[in-house]
Image (tube, helix red, strand yellow):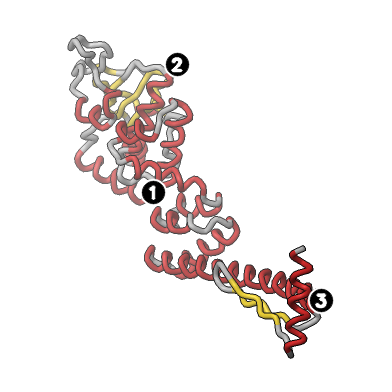
Amino acid sequence: MAAKKTGLGSKGKGLEALINNKLEDFNETGKEVNKSALWELDINMIEPNRKQPRKHFDETALEELAASIKTYGMIQPIVVRKNKDYYEIIAGERRWRAAKICGLKKIPVIEKKWEDAEAFEAALVENLQREDLNPIEEAESYQRLQEVFGLSQEQISTKVGKSRSAVTNSLRLLQLDPRVLNFVIENKLTGGHARTLLSITEKERQFELAEWVIEEELSVRATEALVKAELNKKESAKKEKNEKNLNVNQKAVEDELKTIFSTKVHISQMKNKGKIEITYYSQEDLDRLLTIMKRMEG
């Protein structure tokens, strides 16, 4: 079915502002370089972008948006581009889904004549500027901006309007155990919980603690305390192991010195130093020890 043009030109500026400079219609000279038109399009001719970074949509939130659209209509159009026999969504998939729920036959769209790379980047940036984007989907979007477009973290932060540290911390989440990543995607853990669990580098233990956090419904602060206790326990175990190894080595040296001097020898180990005590039982015994030491010098 043919789409109906309403010829409103570039009036979709409110939506375009969300997608940063990618949606600008004019070049530096003010000449229009990417014509836009507001259409009323058959909803069945529209399909989601297969490369859309957002994969999970809250059903309750969609129902609420659908109710709002049913009452007030679809105030903001979605952005699409022509793709063979259908129109592909660049921005506004959530609104499209909600419109389908409330039974709309046609919805307002703004068509953009973009290449694949432009559409993909715009979809990524638009989603990254949403407040309700899942932390893992956000991190994956940053990663794709790096891998597909070769953007640095600094460039990404400028493009999406966030600090570089926010981008860095978000990307770090992808180092989590895949099972923990799924907990975040399923909203069983928050981004705060996930960032705290990053301190646990052993994946299996990280997963076990994540399960415990979910089961006990721990807050982020309580999770921080849990992780701190876990790290302290690990550090204590490491220290105990080192001391045990040190004691074994110390005993071996003591035994060797006892053999050399034929008397009792004790080594006292301190932080970065120590002392060796060699026992003698008479002046004659002391002279014997001195003789052995002189031979060792020679």
Q: Nearer the viewer, mark 3 or mark 1?
A: 3
**Image x and y of residue 114, in percent:** 36, 17
Quick one: SS at disc 2?
Answer: loop
Tell whether label 1 touches label 3 (CB within 8 Å): no
Mark 3 or mark 2, earlier in chain: 2
| Residue 75, numbered label | none
Q: Residues within 10 Å of mark 2 (few under 14, many from 20)?
A: few
Q: Residues within 10 Å of mark 1 (few under 14, many from 20)?
A: few
> Is residue 103 among what the camera can see?
no
Q: Name the spot of residue 245 as percent of width and height, x first.
A: 68, 69
Between 140 and 200, the one nearer to me in the picture: 200
Mark found first going from the N terminus, 3 or 1: 1
Q: CA distance from mark 2 to mark 1?
A: 30 Å
Nearer the observer: mark 3 or 2; the answer is 3
Is residue 284 left or right of 180 when viewed as pictured? right
In the rendering, which numbered label is found on residue 59?
1
Asked whether the viewer can see residue 253, the reply is yes
The reply to whether discs 2 and 1 touch (Cβ–Cβ < 8 Å) is no
At a point 27% along the width and 46% down the height, the residue shown is 67
Instruction: Give the labeled residue for mark 2.
Output: 84
Q: Which amino acid type is marked by label 3?
A: Thr
The secondary element bearing badge 1 is classed as helix
What separation in Å lies between label 3 and label 2 (alpha carbons)?
A: 90 Å
Tell me the quarter of the picture where residue 15 sits.
top left
Q: Is residue 239 above or below residue 52?
A: below
Residue 168 falls left or right of residue 69: right
Q: Give me the C-alpha separation between circle 3 and circle 1.
A: 79 Å
Q: Report the residue at 25% width, 27% height from top.
A: 16
